[in-house]
Every structure is written in C-alpha cells, then in structure tokens.
Amino acid sequence: MREFNAVVLGAGGVGKSALTVRFMRNEFLESYDPTIQEEYRETVVVDGEPTLLEVLDTAGAEQFTALNEIYISAGRGFVLVFSLTLEASLREVTNLRQQILRIKGENSRVPMVLVGTKLDLTNEREVSPAYVAELSGRWKIPVYETSAKRDWDVTEAFEDLVRQMRQYYPIEERRKKKGRKRRDRIRGGCPCIIM
C-alpha cells in the first residue's frame, strides 16, 4: 500500500479542521477551537486502490509562519483552504501557494487543491464563483467549493489530491532496483567485483 502525507494550510478560522475531520472521521465540528497542529492517519480507497493517507491540519498560517516552512518541506500534497465567506482569506492562500512553489521549486507541478469552505452560508458569501474559477485557471490547480457541515465535495477534494500524488510520485525506483538485483543474482550467479 502506498503512503502519502498531505498538509492543510490556510488562514485561521476558515474551516481547515472542520474540512479535515469531515473527511477523516466523517464528523462535523460544531465549535471553533483554534488548532496548533493535528495529525490524522487513515486508509482511504480512491479508484479502488487503498492508500495510507496522513493529513496534517495546521494552525492559521499567520499565527505560526515559522512552522509553515517545515510543513511545506515535508509535505507531498497540499490543501489550500479559504473561506467563501471571507474574501481576505484568499490573500493568505496566495501567499502560501507562493511559499510552496519557492520551497518545492517554481517549475514543479506540486500536488495541490484549492478549497473554498462554508458553501452552505450562501447569504454570507464574499467570493464569487467566477473569481474562484479564474484563480483555478490561472494557477492550474483544481478548485472545490465545499461545506463540511453538509458534507458537500469534501471527499472529492481529498480524492483529487490523492490522485495527483499518485501521479506525481511514482512508485519508488529503489523498490524496482531491489527486485532487479535479485533477479540478476539468480540469473548470473555470484556478483563479481573488478579492481
């Protein structure tokens, strides 16, 4: 079974924990309790293939900026979260994306999804669907408008990220090489050393 880790990043109070807990435990967090760092590990099945997924739910980016560098360096996939009810939260996501590209390499297509939360709060919406679509096109990453409370498109966002990680990180070459070495030994007898 393949293993991946994903990092959930965004401003404080945008619904990162609610999104993560809805996906990993299928529960909705009613109250807001600021997160410092929470880790979840779960086997998820995407397209019939099981994957061990570790999700790191981080604190609001503006509160612990020094830790972001560590999270981003270790992360293999990223969920960039903003609130559809708070236009200002998009600025933080923009900064985080730039930080990821700086750390991972400007030209790399790092597995990433953009997630707008609180879709169920239609009367409070500040971010237009057109702007979200335009941002997704400009950044060339998929976008999901979600509601953790109603369980709308939460699973789809995480499954998309798992598919991207599978594609971006092919099965390690060393496993293939180990298997090839064993076959060579059997075929050719003892390995020779030339000095």
Image: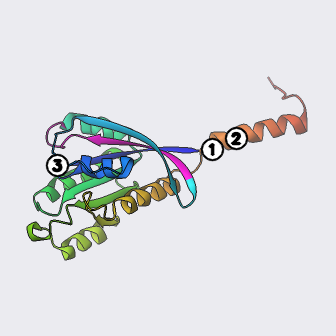
Lower sequence index among marks 3 and 2: 3
Mark 2: few/some/many CA within 10 Å (<14, 14-19, 20+):
few
Local SS, label 3? loop
Whether residue 191 is in magenta: the answer is no
In the image, the segment drawn in magenta is 50-64
Instruction: Determine the CA span between mark 1 and mark 3.
Output: 37 Å
In front of the other: 165 or 83: 83
> Which residue is more in the foreground, 45 or 180?
45
Residue at horizontal 52%, vertical 48%? Answer: 51
Q: Earlier in the sequence, mark 1 or mark 3?
A: 3
Q: Which mark is residue 173?
A: 1
Quick check: marks 1 and 3 in contact, CB under 8 Å? no
Residue 176 falls left or right of residue 70: right
Q: Nearer the viewer, residue 96 or 104?
A: 96
What is the x, y in percent for residue 175?
A: 66, 40
Residue, disc 2: 177
Q: Quadrant of residue 109?
A: bottom left
Residue plotted at (70% across, 40% down): 177
- Kindly identify which numbered label has been placed on residue 11: 3
**Where residue 181 sits: x, y (%)?**
77, 37
Instruction: Estimate the x, y position of residue 113 in percent, counting from the top left.
Output: 34, 59
